Image (spheres, grey):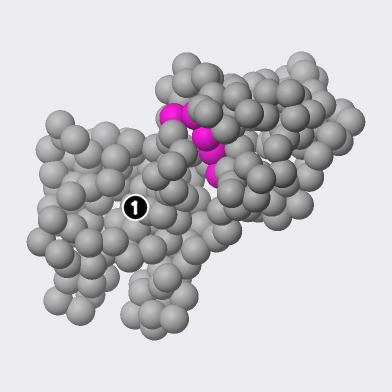
């Protein structure tokens, strides 16, 4: 997903305004704080804990129990558990699914309505509550507080700004660390006074994978896990 996002490097109107300087009024409008509308839902919280435990332990049996038999696998894809297992190579402990679903769920989410008007809980909040005024291909959301923006893609580089829970223009989604062989990946953003780099785990695009859940018959289940669109 991050590789696919790299080609979207142009900025929107707000980026143009910030090309020379980070305009205070624009920055104020870009605040995007975490949202978790399921925090007080006991049924969801119990299900969420069990799901995260299954993902952390790579417990396939427990995971499949937590998924709806007719799970939506994305536009143009077959529905159902067999397709979910196939497309995610579920038998492989190195499948990106373990990490992607875990990250999506831990970031919190919001209730949205499907085409029948029924509520479902979708995570992460970045996708479920993305502000429509911002181009989802050109901006990302900082999903942590006090994130250090570096002058170069390296933890040892000079810190040029600190950001937290806000939207930022993205110039390149995945940049290698300047230290040869170092695994850290960075995202190049437009920062106050120019461009800078933040660790890729601290920024998220709304078109990355989003998971939606529904309490069908009183039992919560994963009903879709898709990228790039809000399932209907």
Measured from the top left, where is residue 139 in percent x and y?
52, 34
Instruction: Give the vertical position of 117 relative to 160 (above or below).
Output: below
* Left or right for 194, reference 189: right
Residue occupying image coordinates x 53% and y 28%: 13
The residue carrying mark 1 is 211
Which picture quadrant has residue 158? top right
Q: Secondary structure at mark 1?
A: strand
| The N terminus lies in quadrant | top left
Residue occupying image coordinates x 12% and y 38%: 78
Instruction: Give the vertical position of 27 relative to 50 (above or below).
Output: above
Instruction: Give the vertical position of 103 relative to 66 (above or below).
Output: above
Which picture quadrant has residue 118? bottom left
Measured from the top left, where is residue 127 in percent x and y?
41, 48
Foreground of the two, 180 or 214: 214
SS majority, magenta: strand
Foreground of the two, 113 or 144: 113
Instruction: Give the vertical position of 125 relative to 132 (above or below).
Output: below
Residue occupying image coordinates x 36% and y 74%: 44
Measured from the top left, where is residue 160 in percent x and y?
84, 34
Foreground of the two, 182 or 153: 153
In the rendered image, residue 149 lying in the magenta stretch gets the answer: no
Foreground of the two, 219 or 209: 209
Which picture quadrant has residue 26? top right
Q: Which residue range is magenta in the image?
A: 137-141
Is residue 138 visible to us here?
A: yes
Measured from the top left, where is residue 2 in percent x and y?
49, 28
Is residue 46 visible to us here?
A: no
Q: How many labels sit on residues?
A: 1
For label 1, the crowd category at 10 Å Cα-Cα, with few meaning under 14, some 14 to 19 and many 20 or more, is: many
């Amino acid at each position: 997903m991050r590789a696919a996002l790299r080609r979207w490097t142009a900025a929107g109107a707000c980026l143009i305004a910030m090309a020379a300087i980070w305009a205070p009024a624009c920055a104020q409008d870009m605040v995007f704080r975490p949202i978790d509308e399921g925090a007080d839902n006991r049924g969801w919280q119990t299900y969420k804990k069990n799901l995260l435990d299954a993902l952390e332990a790579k417990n396939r049996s427990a995971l499949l129990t937590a998924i709806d038999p007719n799970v939506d696998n994305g536009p143009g894809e077959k529905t159902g558990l067999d397709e979910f297992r196939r497309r995610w190579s579920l038998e492989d402990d190195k499948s990106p699914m373990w990490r992607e679903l875990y990250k999506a769920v831990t970031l919190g989410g919001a209730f949205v309505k499907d085409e029948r008007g029924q509520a479902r809980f979708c995570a992460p909040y970045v996708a479920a509550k993305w502000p429509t005024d911002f181009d989802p291909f050109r901006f990302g959301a900082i999903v942590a507080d006090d994130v250090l923006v570096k002058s170069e893609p390296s933890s040892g580089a000079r810190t040029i700004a600190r950001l937290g829970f806000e939207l930022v223009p993205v110039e390149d989604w995945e940049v290698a660390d300047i230290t040869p062989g170092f695994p850290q990946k960075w995202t190049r953003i437009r920062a106050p006074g120019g461009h800078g780099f933040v660790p890729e785990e601290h920024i998220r695009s709304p078109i990355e994978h989003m998971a939606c859940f529904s309490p069908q018959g009183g039992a919560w289940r994963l009903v879709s896990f898709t990228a790039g669109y809000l399932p209907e």
